[in-house]
Image (cartoon, rainbow, N blue to C red):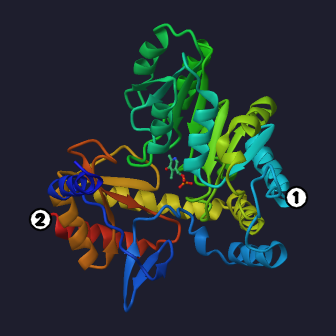
């Protein structure tokens, strides 16, 4: 074997399984449209659930921030990368979510990796929902702790794992809204079980924050649950990028000592923080956007019920249409693309084998006629 042949073999296996991943560059777009040259597609693939990535005030806040602070933070937060604006935004996040502290990370992936790596030690265990995001499962796998997965959204399955003995600490890990199925976790039950066993709960609410609950506070707020660790990300409803963990004072101080992504990586630019502050204001005052998104979701579900594909129980912006095998899923996505709809096909290993799907995402930027056109096309392509 050689590096070259190992790489070629891996590529060949992916091609043979119709699982080869390609990026298609686009010329830009928005929550509603994607463009390339003269063509444009209705965008049903993004995570910009409220359409904020194009919001004038947020764009202006980033521009003004760059004019004031420049484009780079110049170092890690432990050196010179942490400004008054960062500190102010962390406080705003903490207040919004009702936690003592918030710590900013440059991405949700980094936040999850950093938190799990800093917390989990030998003898500990992480009990994670089977469908948790790759950033969580990978971090838990790489840690010296034991990773056990419980059946998706099944507190009984978690309960059985919690009952087996463990000398170290236990961290239960789940998501508010699952990224590939769009369904919500039963957080109250899961948190109660964790507490009964002196375990902590980490909820990654990447897809719930901004769109669920009063002032867009997310899944936990909506379900009346306050996990010990809450991860919110800014690449989805916030329309930007970055993430934060909400926690108590000691945990925040601990992460500042031991979370390597905070110590050895350049901090988020202050200008981006300015954009995020504007985005947070839009989200807090975003009831009209959330209502519009909810109307689009209801319209889609009503019209999709009689499609010959399986839908999930999702009541969120993520509305998967499960086709099954890879090639038919790719073919369906291509037919939709030919008719002017950009919908992504999601295949294993991102989702379980045999459950390849279209991951349709709806946003507040879509108009009712966009949803109707999507439904007509899905019905037209399905026979
Ligand atoms: C998108 C996502 C992440 C990663 O967040 P980024 O900010 O994009 O790195 C983490 N967890 C979940 C559940 C996600 O959907």
360 in relation to 101, above or below: below
289 in relation to 232, above or below: below
Residue 84 circle label: 1
Q: Which residue is identified by label 2?
A: 383
| Residue 187 relative to residue 22: left or right | right
Q: Residue at x 31, y 66 (%)?
A: 22
Residue 62 drawn at (x, y percent):
73, 73
Residue 93 drawn at (x, y percent):
76, 49
The image quarter containing residue 239 is bottom right
The image quarter containing residue 50 is bottom right
Q: In terms of depth relative to the viewer, which is nearer, 70 or 305?
A: 70
Distance between the alpha carbons at the discs numbered 2 and 1? 58 Å
Whether residue 212 can be seen here? no
Q: Residue at x 68, y 76 (%)?
A: 59
Q: Please identify the residue farthest to the bottom as the structure is shown.
A: 38
Residue 310 drawn at (x, y percent):
24, 48
Whether residue 11 can be seen here? yes
Q: Residue at x 45, y 20 (%)?
A: 158
Callout 2: 10 Å neighbours few (<14), some, many (20+)?
A: few
First in sequence: mark 2 or mark 1?
1
What element does badge 2 sit on? loop
Residue 192 drawn at (x, y percent):
58, 20
What element does badge 1 sit on? helix
Q: Please identify the residue farthest to the front as the structure is shown.
A: 2
Q: Please identify the residue farthest to the right as the structure is shown.
A: 84
Residue 263 circle label: none
| Residue 368 relative to residue 59: left or right | left
Q: In terms of depth relative to the viewer, which is nearer, 135 or 299?
A: 135
């Amino acid at each position: 074997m050689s590096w070259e042949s190992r790489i070629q073999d891996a590529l060949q296996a992916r091609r043979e399984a119709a699982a080869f991943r390609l990026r298609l560059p686009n010329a830009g777009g928005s929550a509603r449209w994607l463009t390339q040259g003269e063509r444009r597609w209705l965008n049903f693939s993004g995570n910009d659930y409220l359409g904020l990535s194009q919001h004038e005030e947020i764009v202006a806040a980033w521009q003004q921030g760059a004019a004031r602070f420049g484009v780079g933070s110049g170092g890690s937060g432990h050196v010179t990368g942490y400004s008054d604006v960062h500190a102010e935004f962390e406080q705003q996040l903490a207040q919004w979510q009702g936690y003592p502290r918030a710590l900013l990370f440059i991405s949700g992936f980094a936040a999850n990796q950093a938190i799990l790596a800093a917390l989990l030690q030998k003898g500990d265990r992480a009990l994670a929902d089977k469908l948790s995001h790759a950033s969580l499962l990978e971090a838990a796998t790489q840690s010296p702790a034991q990773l056990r997965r419980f059946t998706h959204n099944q507190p009984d399955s978690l309960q059985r794992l919690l009952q087996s003995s463990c000398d170290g600490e236990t961290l239960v890990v789940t998501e508010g809204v699952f990224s590939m199925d769009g369904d919500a976790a039963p957080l109250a039950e899961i948190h109660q079980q964790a507490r009964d066993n002196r375990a902590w709960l980490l909820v990654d609410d990447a897809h719930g924050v901004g769109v669920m609950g009063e002032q867009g506070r997310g899944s936990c707020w909506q379900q009346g649950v306050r996990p010990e660790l809450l991860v919110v990300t800014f690449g989805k409803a916030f329309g930007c990028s970055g993430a934060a963990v909400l926690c108590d004072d000691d945990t925040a101080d601990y992460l500042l000592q031991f979370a390597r992504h905070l110590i050895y990586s350049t901090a988020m630019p202050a200008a981006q923080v300015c954009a995020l502050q504007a985005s947070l204001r839009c989200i807090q005052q975003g009831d009209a956007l959330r209502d519009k998104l909810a109307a689009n979701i209801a319209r889609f579900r009503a019209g999709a019920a009689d499609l010959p594909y399986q839908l999930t129980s999702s009541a969120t912006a993520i509305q998967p249409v499960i086709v099954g095998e890879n090639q038919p899923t790719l073919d369906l996505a291509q037919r939709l693309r030919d008719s002017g709809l950009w919908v992504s096909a999601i295949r294993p290993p991102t989702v379980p084998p045999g459950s390849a799907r279209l991951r349709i995402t709806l946003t507040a930027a879509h108009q009712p006629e966009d949803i109707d056109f999507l439904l007509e096309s899905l019905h037209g392509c399905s026979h």
